[in-house]
Image (spheres, rainbow, N blue to C red):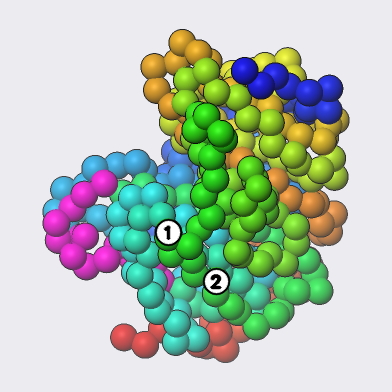
Amino acid sequence: MTVPTQTSRTIAGVINSVETLEGGGFLVRRPFPKSSFSEFDPFLLLDELGPINLKPGQAKGAPDHPHRGFEIVSYVLDGRLEHKDSAGHAGLLNPGDVQWMTAGAGVVHSEMPESMFTQTGGRLHGIQLWVNLPQRHKMMPPRYQEIPAAHIPVAQTEDRSVTVRVIAGEALGAKAVIQTRTPIIYLHFTLQPGATIIQPVPKEYNAFAYVLEGSGLFGTEPAPGDDGQMVLFSQDGEDVAISNPADAQRPLDLLLIAGVPLNEPVVRYGPFVMNTEAEIAQAIDDYQEGRMGRIDA
């Protein structure tokens, strides 16, 4: 079995998720932001929607709402979501698909369950990550990178005990196809019982793991992390160590996310993230006056 190296990071803390209602009334698990842990530079928010089994007519979404100043990464694990915006963009996200939306100067956006999925019901599970934009890119034109599941690079260890889907960054020799505005690592690992992975993460990156399913051990002095928990890594090493105990009853499913801190002022108001209060006031005014556009019916 692989063992942590002398350069592996220790654990800085474990954060429990809280449950909150969002959008049209759907339940999410959120490790941050909350009163005790507001942000993790350069990341602003992490939401886990589900997993939940919905009856016909129960699926809810997030109707028309604005964004400015950051990026939104939507990762669908189960279910089907329709989206459209005030720039005329529209599409459908299926299981395994990733949408990396750069809101930039601002868009009005809608994310709703696909109509047939709403009618039939089914399992819904997804992740949404908000990534802050550097000040110089805050007002860039909005853009989308939509990667279907079949185009997300997948790699395995030789013994197939560890599988990774590479959404951003690089792991096990596979490199992501998504381009990010700041250096980001976004990896979806699945570890079988008894497996360990040592993933390189440069010391200057802030890094955390979010456990989707199972219970794992993290860091050089292994600390446990369970379903719905966020495990924070310290910045005292050049890689992170993650293990699924040999006596585990199920695979360990988790996200490993890391990024270079921007070290810039952050002012937030709902779906707007800027550097000053004046910029927030301008964003609100631009939205209310229709300068971000509207979604066509």
SS at mark 2? Answer: strand
**Percent of width and height locating residue 195:** 55, 23
Q: Is residue 113 part of the magenta span, yes or no? A: yes
The quadrant in which the C terminus is found is bottom left
In the figure, 291 relative to 214: above or below?
below
Residue where numbered disc 2 is placed: 145
Quadrant hosting residue 216: top right
Q: What residue type is labelled 2?
A: Gln
Write the start and end of the magenta stretch as one range.
110-123
| Residue at x 50%, y 86% (from the top left corner) | 87
Label 1 crowd (10 A; few <14 / some 14-19 / many >=20): some
Apparent side of residue 235 relative to residue 245 in the rendered image (left or right): right
Residue where numbered disc 1 is placed: 149
Apparent side of residue 94 relative to residue 89 in the rendered image (left or right): left
* Residue nearest the viewer, comparing 195 with 125: 195
In the figure, 149 relative to 239: above or below?
below
